[in-house]
Image (tube, grey):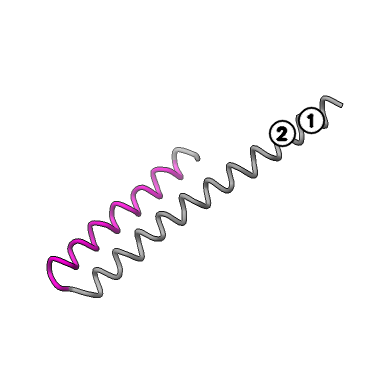
Amino acid sequence: MSLDGKVDSTKDKISGKAKEVEGKVTGDKAREAQGKAEGVLGKAKEKLDDAKDAVKDTVDDVKEKFNKD
């Protein structure tokens, strides 16, 4: 995962958790839901970056194999 991607997804997860806790403490269900959604978005971004890295690694492996032959 790229550093930018890691920072972005971590920021979303932390911000989401903070909003979720704020919503729970204040009884604001909308804020709590917003925080949960933002946390899920951060996790999704992380998974997407992991998948992109896996595809890139596979493509690089295939290129390397073809260049050997």
In the displayed structure image, the side of residue 58 where residue 67 appears, left or right? right
Percent coordinates x, y for residue 28 in the rendering = 18, 73
Rendered residue at 79%/30% (across/down):
65
In the rendered image, the residue lying farthest to the right is 69
Q: Which mark is residue 61?
A: 2
Disc 1 designates what residue? 65
Q: Judge whether residue 60 is colored magenta.
A: no
Tell me the SS state at disc 1. helix
Q: CB under 8 Å between callouts 1 and 2? A: yes
Asked where in the image residue 35 lies, by quadrant, the reply is bottom left
Q: Looking at this rendering, what residue extends furthest in the top direction?
A: 68
Report the side of 66 relative to 21 (left or right).
Answer: right
Q: Residue furthest left?
A: 26
- Where residue 39 appears, x then y in whole percent? 35, 58
Q: Secondary structure at mark 2?
A: helix
Q: Residues within 10 Å of mark 2 (few under 14, many from 20)?
A: few
Numbered range of the magenta stretch: 4-27
Residue 44: % across, % down: 46, 57
Question: How many C-alpha atoms fall within 10 Å of the one at disc 1: few (<14), some, or many (≥20)?
Answer: few
Q: Residue at x 29, y 51 (%)?
A: 14
Question: Dividing the picture into quarters, in which one does residue 29 lie?
Answer: bottom left
Relative to 47, say whether 29 is above or below.
Answer: below
- Looking at the rendered image, the quarter that the C terminus falls into is top right
- Which secondary structure dominates the residues rendered in magenta? helix
How far is the residue under mark 1 from the one under mark 2?
6 Å
Residue type at mark 1 is Lys
Q: Disc 2 marks which amino acid?
A: Asp
Q: Is residue 24 left or right of residue 49?
A: left
- Residue 48 higher or lower than 20, as above or below: above
Task: Determine whether, in the image, residue 17 is placed left or right of residue 46.
Answer: left
Residue beneath the point at 82% across and 28% down = 67
